[in-house]
Amino acid sequence: RESVFFAWVLQMSWRPTYRSSKFRNVYGKVANREHCFEGIPVTKNVHDNHFCAVNAKFLAIVTESAGGGSFVVIPVTQFGRIDPHYPKVCGHHGNVLDIKWNPFHDNIIASCSEDSSVRIWEIPDGGLRRNLTESVLELYGHSRRVGLIEWHPTTSGILFSAGYDYKILIWNLEIGEPVKMIDCHTDVILCMSFNTEGSLLATSCKDKKLRVIEPRSGKVLQEANFKNHKVNRVVFLGNMKRLLTTGVSRWNTRQIALWDQEDLSIPIIEEEIDGLSGLLFPFYDADTRMLYLAGKGDGNIRYYEITLEKPYLQYLMEFRSPAPQKGLGVMPKHGLDVGACEVFRFYKLVTLKGLIEPVSMIVPRRSETYQEDIYPMTPGTEPALSADEWLSGINRGPVLMSLKEGYNRPNKLVFKAPVKEKKGGVVNGIDLLENVPPRTENELLRMFFKQQEELRRLKDELTQKDIKIRQLELELNNTRNSPNINNNNNSSSNGSSI
């Protein structure tokens, strides 16, 4: 028996290492044409964002429009061709650059724009009947256009915005004001990502640096400036204490890098992807530990499985399509079809066709029962903290829910806008809209014309004040030379002599 056992051990030691995975055969399935959205004039803006946001109720897409920015909001079940005159959300005065749904309220969406504002909108159940121009909240604090917004993952009423003034503002929507400012970046912020409980914020910046920040204090905990990897996008990998970045190597090839969040001195691994030029967007699913890579302008989506042990990144498969994608929206977990073993769903923007294609990532299973091994407890639609609790320093993980019973549970959270709205703000003792030098020719011209107008106004005020001063001097002289005043003075002098 011992000889047989040792022979078996020897045989096993010579076998090639093979790692089994329940997600090896995940495949992408494009929805039928009748379940797509057609006729939507997707924006032609070249800003590196997705221009799409989706939740269990609505699909929102930034559209091409003249005279300001707009986006459409369509119920996710309203498939087919969209009417050219379909109602839009059109209150911004500049192009809309980013939109994000509130994770705890399916009817609340935030948008940011080139008009330097962030706005909060409330979409009625069933969608829009007419154009929506009045927002629930208008947030002014950035001095230049706002390119990114992110909701806090566990706290209700906290929104982060990043502008071209190199600042990140933290908004408390319960009072409608910025309560914190993160001012550690030296160039445009490209991406923001939170860890699971929202206690850490990772950012990538045009200055080629990767930063891990404590958001409430604005303190930079870790910073990386790796010469072999120019960071474009960053994402936290759940509770694995890992970061993944996509970027460009020194040879201008697309690559990804895995980092330890507590030590950014050197990446754990780097992996070349291909030699294409489109930006790589990373999407991470913490429940399945799967990473999806989608290139802007590509038609394919690669997916990997992440592990804590070597090789760290296990390539699984690739979804291929001939239609290039401008951006991708991602359905939250509670909006997936668990009966079809769907573990992820993209909404793919195809600009040339004005088409939005749902792409489902499916685990092939024959059983029709609920698959608990691929649907663990997942972050739900209830906030773990209030805005005041989080700002006071409390950290708490997300409130988990089961997709077996809880995904149809109604949400009782009600969004209440503050009564006062402030256009502008002072954070950390700094006026956010004051004394910002221009960085482009257009900004310089705007500032020049603004100053010329201010000079004209001040000159008019000075002229009016000079006229008023002359009038007062004349009145004073007339009063002094009045005969009544002289008679009174003489009588008073006679009385004093007596």
Image (tube, rainbow, N blue to C red):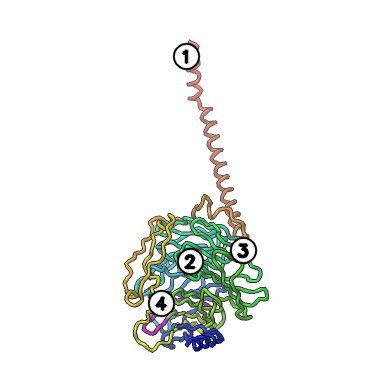
Image side of residue 34 versus residue 461, left or right = left
Q: Position of residue 280 (x, y in %)?
A: 57, 76
Mark 1 or mark 2: which comes first in sequence?
A: 2
Residue kind at label 2, given as amino acid type: Asn
Q: Which residue is mark 2?
A: 195
74 sits to left or right of 321:
left
Q: Could one spot residue 96 in this view of the protein?
A: no
- Crowding near the residue tagged with mark 4, few <14, some 14–19, many ≥20 C-alpha atoms within 10 Å: many
Dot 1: element: helix
The magenta-colored residue range is: 326-342
Circle 4: element type: strand
Tags 3 and 2 touching, CB below 8 Å:
no
- Residue at 56% x, 53% y is 434
Task: Find residue 124 and report its horizontal and vertical position in percent.
Answer: 36, 71
Residue 259, percent from left and from top: 56, 69
Residue 337 within the magenta-colored segment of the rendering:
yes
Give amino acid for label 4.
Ile
Q: Which of the two labelled residues, at mark 3 and mark 1, occupies the earlier sequence position?
A: 3
Q: Identify which residue, 42 or 328, lies in the foreground.
A: 328
Can you tell which of label 3 and label 4 is closer to the viewer?
4
Disc 1/disc 2 C-alpha distance (Å): 92 Å
Outermost residue toward the top in this view: 498
Q: From the image, tell me which residue sits under label 1.
A: 495
Closer to the camera in the image, 38 or 189: 189
Height in image: 38 above or below 433?
below
For mark 3, does the 10 Å Cα neighbourhood hold few (<14), some (14 to 19), or many (20 or more) residues? few
- Residue pointed to by mark 4: 74
- Looking at marks 4 and 2 on the same chain, the residue that comes earlier in the sequence is marked by 4
